[in-house]
Structure formats: structure tokens, C-alpha cells
Amino acid sequence: MADGYRFHTFKPPQTRRRRAVIVCVWCHEKKIKCDLQETSGQGFGKCTNCASIGVSCSIRPSKRCRRERPRRLDESIAEARPDPPLDVGEQDQPLTPPLGTETSDETSSQTQLAPIIPEGAYPGLFDPACMPTSVPENHSIATTERIATADDAADSYLGEVNYEVVYGSEIRSDADGQRRQAPPSPEKHDLPPRDLQQAFQETFFENCFTWCPVFDYDTIQNDFAQSPLVANALGLAAGHIKPPVIQHADPATYYDRMKQLFYGDKEPNLLMCLKAISLTYWWSPRPPSRVHRDTSWWWTTVAIRHAQHGGFHREPRPEQMVRSQVDPGLRRRIWWTFFARERLTALCQSRPCVIDPADCTIPPPTIHDFPEHQRGVQAEIFLRWINLCSTIGAIAKHLQRTGPDNIISTPFPIGLARELLTWAHETPMHLRLDFLSSTTTNFNRNVHQLHLPYLATVIVLHLSRTPSALPRAYPAAMVAASCIARILRDCLLRGHIRYLMGITCWYCSMALVALLHARQINHLSRAAEADIESVVLTLRELRAMWPTANVFLRGFERLRTISDTEDAIPPGEMDDISAAQGIDWRGYFPFASPETSEITGWLLGSGAGGEVIGTEEVGVEELLTFELVDLFGMEGLL
């Protein structure tokens, strides 16, 4: 051979692993893999690492594109060539890019890459320009282990405790198989018109978001487009609260559509199912005097079981968080919404609590669980509401166990009463009732509604049994009832009250019980009648939306007839039921004053002292919290 002849070893072309175009500052500093480029395409604002530890996630500007290597002509043409259009059959199912995972050389060439964004041109992670919009026809993804996408987010069990960890891969494989075998959804659904959808969204954020923060401004349009179940559920709730004047489907029609989609298993996405169920709280076609599957108790329990099946009651590990594709803050908001409703229903309907906190590892919600632009007063009220409902649930358990069998010997739950006192005094000033004067100058419908369950619970704790059908109300109960009447009067003065939830009927019923007792006291009779008028007027307005209001109106007429046949109660000397336990009942009302109402003027006034409670001295054995069941002639109060 001639000198200088060299053999060149042939190497087959290998796919070069490309660097991620978008990485965050934190992952870059820690020298760890960052999947911000993939998660941003899924609609998340953080990479998996930052989301799992709760730190801020900001894009690190790239310095490499300043010295970009010269590219061959064929590379430039290939990158500049537009993607071929999708087939008609492919357009029915939106495609979502896979999450960033380590891939082999054989499969890495098949993985879709996000478009390169030049340095200094990052309009935002949610900008459509940053997200892939089409996929070539011959595009394929390795299916050795399926990666969950936003289209089927959180529809499999994520608890994975005990034996589920051992068989985790088989469980996930079976879930993937069920997804693939699921029949396609019908191509056409009955949906609200587009202009009505916008109106329904506005109604939701104005009236429902505080108590049901399961939608965000940035994602609700996508939820509408993705799920006919959600679209009809939102039409149900919003159309019931603020019916459009133009011709539209009535709430019952939306409800029937929603039930057909839900019970027909037409919505495979668990997250969409939970969001839709949460909206049924603003609909009740009939009272729960008989067992049926349209009550708030039924739907709340269904949602809780669905959420538990999806592991929402447990805080997910980082790898589970990636697989579920559900924002952790949204998970917490959804779970605690159903928790609060279940606790309230346990009290007003004397139902057993379904959720055992000992089974849950999910932490309470915080203000950081809300999007930055939605961390206002509505979010703060939601957090205070969750805290209050936790105490209410404990009180409900105490009531249920202090029955004929006398499982709990303590007649008055001193610890729970102190929790209520703490809640009232720890509530920030801007979230308290503006009741220090006779006129409300700073009306906030959500702040007013926040205090309704608090005041109703105070009434429940300060009622006791009597030989007659009408329970005895102590001073704390009468003041709380007068404050409820003031809240309702403020709402009535400002027009419609359709935004009030169905459970408001029960709050009214508890206020009427205490006010009927105050009506029997000579010097409180006139003031009690004025408050009763406001509460009864509210029930009459609510019965157009909530059939349960009629039940309470009939019960009120019966109790008032009984009250009229009894003798007036003379003034007497007696402390409140809680006085023997070392609690000053006036501490329940840091937001009230003698100017709040005529009743508070008598009972909170400087000259009231501990007198004029309106009943004789009773023994400790009679100070048992009475049973709410059947007070209004039925075992379900909602």
C-alpha cells in the first residue's frame, strides 16, 4: 500500500441528544435535569423539581445561541419546513407532547421537540408560540411505558401505599390499557352557545369561585372545550344563580345532560369529573326528606370517593406529581372544597363524617395554592372557610355521639367552643363583619356568607332541650341569630339573593329557633319579631331556587304556633350555658356591638350584665346539646 493511505473507520450515523432549549435557573445551578420545556407545553408554570420543593421557577436565559454553530443547508430547510397537516381523524383527539424522560438512541429520534425560541424572546410559558401545535403524520412515540398526559390526567390511583407499591407498574399498565380500550366520545354534544359560555364563566367567578375555586381564569376556556361534562355543569350552576334573559336551556336540562354524561361514563378524565361535580352544589331539585341521588350529600360523597380513588387525599411524591399532571395547588383546592362541604352537611343533616383526617396526608391549602393573579380576598375567605369547617365537623361528631346512648359524657364541648372563639379573633379585620354600627358601609357578600356557618354553629352549641318542642336558647344563641338576621337584611337591601347557597336555608332555620325563644321574653319580643321578619322573607325568596326553604317555612309556622300557646318568660338571673366552663360568650362576637341590632343592644349593652336570659336556673344534667334531627319534621335538613 502507498504511504500515507489511511483507513477510515465507518461509524453509523447516531442521533445526537439535543440540549433542552428552556431550563430554569434553580436546576441549572444544581446541575440537574430540568423538564421545564416539557411541563410548560402541558400548561404548567414550573418544572417538576421546582414544583416538588415549592421554589420559584424562572427561565435561565441561554448564552449558547449567541455562538450558534453554522448549520448545513439541509438542516435549515428541515427546521424551516412547516409540519404537514393532520388527518381529519387525528384532529378529533388533541395530541400532547410527551414529558421529558431519558430515552434510548432508537427512540430519541422519534420524540417531538419543542420549537426553538430565540434568546430574549420568552413571551411566557403559556404563550401559544411556546407550545407545539402540530405533529407530523408519521410521528410515533415509544410505548414501552406510557407517559400520562393532560388529556387523561389523574384518572388512576396515586395512593400507592403498602402492596400498591409492589404492583404499581401492573396497576399503571392496566390503567393505560383501559384508556386505550375506552370507546371514543360522541362527536356532537349539546353545549351552551359560545356567548352564553362567557356569561356563565363571569357568573361563576363572581358568585361561586370563593367557595369552589376549582377553575382558573387561564384554564377555564380549555376545560370548556375539553369536557362537555364541565360545560353543562357550569351552565347548570350559573344558569340557576343568574338566569339569562334571552332564551336558553333551563338548569334542569343542563342537569339531565350532566347526569347522562357522568353516569354514562362519557368523561374519562377524573379531574374534569371532580370539577363538574363541584358545581352541583348550586342545584337541588327536591328536599332530602326522602333518599334520592340528587342531594348535595350524594354528590359530595361521590366526589370524595372519586377523589380518594385518585389519591387526592394524599400529597403526591414528585414522581407521582409528574404522572398525575395535576397542579398540586389545584389538587389541594379541590380536595378541601369537598372536605368543607362534607363537614357542613354532617352538621346540618346529622350525617356521619365521611373523611377521616387520619387517612389524609395532604396539607391544608395556602394562599400559594392559587394563581398569583387570584390571590385576593376571595382566596383568603376560602382559607378561613376551610379552617372553620374543620371545627364544625368536630362539633358535628360531638352532636351525633351525644345522643340517647350518651357516648360522650361531657355536656358542653369546651374545647370546640374555644376553637370557635379563636377562629373569630384570628380572622383578619378586613374579613370581619362590619357590624360595629347600625349601618353596613362596607358590604361584601362573601364576608357576610363566611360568617353564616360560624353564627349557626354558635346557635347549635347554645341550645338545650326543653319539655316543649321549642328548644331553649341562651344569650349567645340569641345574639348569633340576630347577627344572621342582620346579614340577611343587608343582602335583601341590595337586591337579589340568588347567589346564596342552598345551605343558607338551614342557617335561617337555626336563627328562627333562637329568635322564637327571644320572642317569648317580654322586652326582647318586638326586636325578635323584626329579626324574624327578615329571616322569613329570605326563606320566601330562596324557595324559588331551593325547595328545602318550603320545609323550613312550614316548620317555622308550626313552632310559632307552639310558642304562641306558651306563657311569656319573665326576666331571670342566669349565665349562659358556657359560663360554667369559663367562657365569656360575648367573645364570640368581636365584630358586633350594642349598635348591631336591638337584641344585641340589650344583651351586649353595658347594663345587660348576666341577667335577662329568659329562663329559670337549670341543672347541669339538662345542659346537653339537643338533637337537631327531626326538629323541623324530617331527618334531613337540606
Image (cartoon, rainbow, N blue to C red):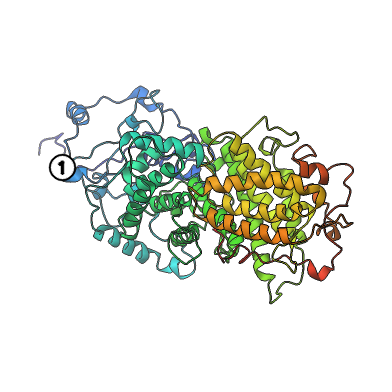
Is there any visible trace of residue 156 in the rendered image?
yes
- Residue drawn at x 36%, y 45% is 250
The mark tally for this picture is 1
Along the line of sight, the residue nearer the viewer: 255 or 175: 255
Q: Nearer the viewer, residue 445 or 4?
A: 445
Indicate the position of residue 438 as horizontal and vertical percent values.
Answer: 73, 34
How many residues crowd mark 1 within 10 Å: few (<14), some (14–19), many (20+)? few
Classify the position of the N terminus by image quarter.
top left
Q: Which residue is mark 1?
A: 88
**Image position of 332 (left or right of 584):** left
Q: Nearer the viewer, residue 547 or 15?
A: 547
Q: Secondary structure at mark 1?
A: helix
Residue 442, image x, y percentages? 66, 31
Q: Residue 155 appears in which quarter of the rendering?
A: bottom left
State whether residue 268 appears in this view: no
The single residue placed furthest to the front in the displayed view is 565
Query: Measured along the vertical axis of the image, is residue 277 above or below residue 135?
Result: below
Point out the residue furthest to the left here.
Answer: 1
Tell me the quadrant of the picture where the C terminus can be found: bottom right
Question: Residue 206, position in %: x, y?
Answer: 50, 36
Q: Amino acid at mark 1?
A: Val
Residue drawn 67% across the image and 59% down it: 561
- For residue 203, side relative to residue 522 (left or right): left
Residue 449 x %, y %: 60, 43
